Each structure stands twice: as structure tokens, then as C-alpha cells.
Amino acid sequence: MPTPIMDLSNLDVESLHRALQQSFSSDDDLRRPAEELIKELKYVNGSCLMLIRVATEAQVQFEVRQAAAIQLKNISRETWTERQSIYPLFDSNNNSEQKKRPVPILPEDQKLRLRTGILDALLSEHEKSLRDLFAEAFNHMAMYDYPQKWG
């Protein structure tokens, strides 16, 4: 029987893949910890780079690739740039005031790798639903970075 995943400090691509897979499980003991881990990914350094690896790996089950692409799109949208607002961007999944944490902004080195990875994925992906998700993420990145930060 698979074991639940929840250790964010040692998260690697294989653990992330397993968590995405377990998020589809009918077993609550596997699904709930996986869903909690996925909610925390925006706070894990390098999670977008791991998500793109899962989303673009042809050997990975399609539903898992799609879940990774959805999370990549959502997290990159939330963490790409600082919001111009009088209200800081807080994690909307936390309901109580004391649990609110600011959502971190991706470092420039990761943004560079993501721009390249998303563009490569967009141009090489055969599945339309995945291409659409990559295109949406790419569009958001380009809105903020093109042409100044495009290298």
C-alpha cells in the first residue's frame, strides 16, 4: 500500500509525481495529505520547475501530467510578480487571519528557466489540453516580462 506524502522539506520530482497521483485516490488517507501538499507547493522553492518536469514527461500518466500543468499555471500566475495593490497577496486557502502568509515571488533564475521550459513544452506538446495550459502560463509570463526580461 502506498504511503501518504507530506514532507515538503525533502520534496523532489518523484515525491511530487506521487502526490499528484495520490490526489486522484479514492482512499482519503492518501488523497487528503496529497491535496494538502499540493496546496503548499507555492511555498516550496523550485516547485514550478519540478511541476514542469512532471507535466512534460511523456511516460507519466496523462491525468497526472494535466494536474501538474494546472498547478504550474496557477502557481506561476500567483508567484510571477508582485501585485500592484493596497492589499498584499495572501494565500486564499487560509481562512483565519493568523494563518495568512504572503505568497512568495519566484526568483529571477527560476523565472528564466520556466520561460524557456514553458516555451519548449508549448512547442513540443501533442496533447491540446496540455498545450492550452502551457499557453495560458506562457501568456501570463510574457505579459509581465516581454521584452525587457526575455533573453
Image (spheres, rainbow, N blue to C red):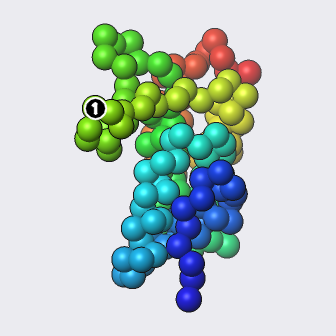
Helix, strand or loop at disc 1? helix
Q: How many labels does the image show?
A: 1
For the point 57% across and 78% down, the residue is 3
> Above or below — where is 102 with respect to 76?
above
Which quadrant would the C terminus be assigned to in this image? Answer: top right
Q: Where is residue 24 in the image (x, y as percent from the top left)?
A: 42, 73
Question: Farthest bottom residue?
Answer: 1
Quadrant position of residue 78: top left
Task: Look at mark 1 in the image and give the residue it sits on.
Answer: 97
For the point 46% across and 31% down, the residue is 103
> Above or below — where is 23 with respect to 25?
above
Which quadrant would the N terminus be assigned to in this image? Answer: bottom right
Q: State the residue in front, 42 or 140.
A: 42
Question: Farthest front residue?
Answer: 98
The amino acid type of the residue labelled 1 equals Glu
Q: Position of residue 85 (x, y in %)?
A: 33, 13
Q: Position of residue 52 (x, y in %)?
A: 62, 51
For the point 58% across and 18% down, the residue is 146
Residue 62 visible in image: no
> Above or below — where is 147 with respect to 140?
above
Quadrant position of residue 45: top right
Q: State the residue in front, 88 or 119.
A: 88
- Position of 90 with respect to 40 (left or right) is left
Residue 46 visible in image: yes
Q: Position of residue 64 (x, y in %)?
A: 52, 67
- Which class describes the residues within 10 Å of circle 1: few (<14), some (14-19), or many (20+)? few
